[in-house]
Amino acid sequence: MAGPDATPALGIPPGHMPRAGQCRIWIRGRPPGRQPRPKSRPCAGLAAAAPAGSWILYRPATSARLVHVRVVDEHRAGKVVRLRVFEIESGKFVREEQP
């Protein structure tokens, strides 16, 4: 069994990614149809609205095949603790960066 620091699979359908250059909040464990709206919006100030344990998805305008996942602390809303990069189509983990 994987520990709490194991890198999870992306597990997000490509059609639910934010538009290039924008962000969205994704609540892990919640089905795609039950995710918060709006689906895509500017990134500025979004961390403050991110609930504990959520992910902030950012799709860079310069690399449409990747998504940057800002992992919010399990106990502190808005506190980004990890930044992981995944391929959108395959869901494959690419790398981890400093938040």
Image (tube, rainbow, N blue to C red):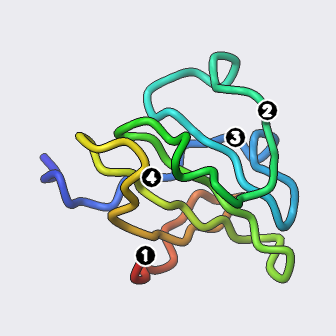
Q: Mark 3 to mark 4: distance in Å?
A: 12 Å
Which quarter shows the C terminus? bottom left
Q: Mark 1 to mark 3: distance in Å?
A: 24 Å
Of circles 1 and 4, which is in front?
1
Q: Position of residue 57 (x, y in %)?
A: 62, 54
Q: From the viewer's perspective, is residue 19 above or below residue 63?
A: above
Of circles 3 and 2, which is in front?
2
Q: Using the rendered view, name the quadrant where residue 33 is placed.
A: top right
Q: From the viewer's perspective, is residue 84 above or below residue 95?
A: above
Q: Residue at x 83, y 71 (%)?
A: 64
Q: Position of residue 48 (x, y in %)?
A: 52, 47
Q: Identify residue for label 2.
A: 38
Determine whether, in the image, residue 42 is placed left or right of residue 94: right
Q: Mark 3 to mark 2: distance in Å?
A: 16 Å
Q: Mark 1 to mark 4: distance in Å?
A: 19 Å
**Amino acid type, callout 2:** Pro
Q: Position of residue 25 (x, y in %)?
A: 61, 42
Q: Identify residue for label 4.
A: 9
